Amino acid sequence: MKCAVAARRSQRGSVAVITGITIAVLIGFLGISVDLGRLFVVKAELQTAMDSCALAAASGLRPGMNDANSLARARAFGRAPVDPGATSSSGTGRGESVNQVNFQDANLDPQKIEFAFGSRLDDVRPSWTDVNTARYARCSYPLDGVAVYFMRVLGGATVASVGATATATLKESIGPSCIFPVAMCNLDGNTDPAQRWGLTAGQWQRAVEKSNEFGSGRFGWLDLNGNANGSAELKEWIGGEGYCGPVSDELKPGAKQGVEVQWNSRFGVYKKGAGLPSESDSPPDFTGYSYRDLTNENKPADNWAPDGWESDPKLVINAFRGTDQNSRGGATEPNYEGTSASRAAFQYSLNGYAKTATDHAKHGRTRRIVPVPVFDCTSTPGTAKSIKNAFACVLLVHPISVPKDASIEFLGRADEIEACRSAGAVGGSTGSGPLVPVLVQ
């Protein structure tokens, strides 16, 4: 009896010990599940940020273009997706699209991003300096000091480190953000994309009316898919998102009747009638402001361009971001960037129903800046051949009452202008559009 009592006395406190050990083990498992789960989320957030960085950086590369600023541009583009002070030229405000970590509660330091470039995926280096061969951009970020909470109870680390790396390159697209169905003519037979086919940003081109008018300073309508369905398909592509497929080599000379209704919808000018475009299916641009005085449409009375601009294809007019060169009535006209920011409406009268500035603010999208193919318009009248993978970015200058009076302004290569390069399905070896960024690692 005395032995049994002594044995029970010797076991006193064992439950407390077992309970303490059990609690410690449970806390350990909790630490594994909660702390490691939290680190996994932070890692995923960081990976998203680096994916965005690599895609943005790759979009700044200019392989084969001898662009001395391409690597600096790529670094600046790459930092923007994690920089709360960055502002997007497409209208996104400061900090509205910044990738963060710690459950989207903490900003990353853009200056801590580690960049590397190269001509091949197996040779991407931080020391790469050759701007002409850089085709790959890599972003890495070592994130130190991520707090852990439960595992420290067991004497484990109080902080942890995670990292993420992403690599992107440029691939040919299957049509750049859907192609607008017109083709620019190059200048003086220049077919070199590094020289922008002889064109200078700000030059205007006018639509051809007859096949023998192809040449410098002109553009033509395109049968983009080779079906030869004429104005019916043109109307669909102009009023909608454009054409999203392989590009035909066939130009359709002459003005295509009826396309003016769809063209004008991009300016917020709508003609009422069954089956015609509306702001719901054919939204307007952010601004409908016109750079031709349509009350004198067939006379040299442009409200922005100087008189006689049509006879000088090398004249830089620059309605996009330039200064009014031909003010009418003493008033200086605002450029496209200014009217887009203020959501200015079409300022003239036309056979249609123009939307207000409020409508442009509500329904507006980037609809007047579009990618188009570039053709080699030779000195032989009426001949034009497509240039492989040649795509320009243009501004639609003004609404029209007849197709032959349409005008466009050259802004640059499609890969140089954000609104023209930001979309496009990657086509790989079968792609025929401009280069677009794609993740490869």
Image (cartoon, rainbow, N blue to C red):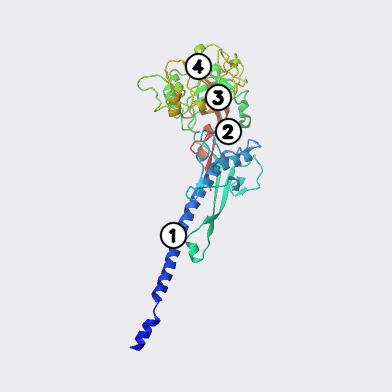
Identity of the amino acid at label 4? Lys
**Residue wearing tag 2:** 416
Please, what is the three-letter code of the amino acid marked with disc 2?
A: Glu
Q: Which residue is mark 4?
A: 404
Closer to the N terminus: mark 4 or mark 1? 1
Q: Earlier in the sequence, mark 2 or mark 3?
A: 3
The earlier-in-sequence mark between 3 and 1 is 1
Helix, strand or loop under label 1: helix
Between disc 4 and disc 2, the foreground one is 2
Residue under circle 1? 33
Q: Nearer the viewer, mark 2 or mark 3?
A: 2
Q: CA distance from mark 3 to mark 1?
A: 60 Å
In primary-sequence order, the first of circles 2 and 1 is 1
Cα–Cα gap, marks 2 and 1:
47 Å
Contact flag, marks 2 and 1 (Cβ < 8 Å) = no
Residue behind mark 3? 184
Crowdedness of circle 1 by 10 Å Cα count: few (<14), some, many (20+)? Answer: few
Q: CA distance from mark 4 to mark 2?
A: 28 Å
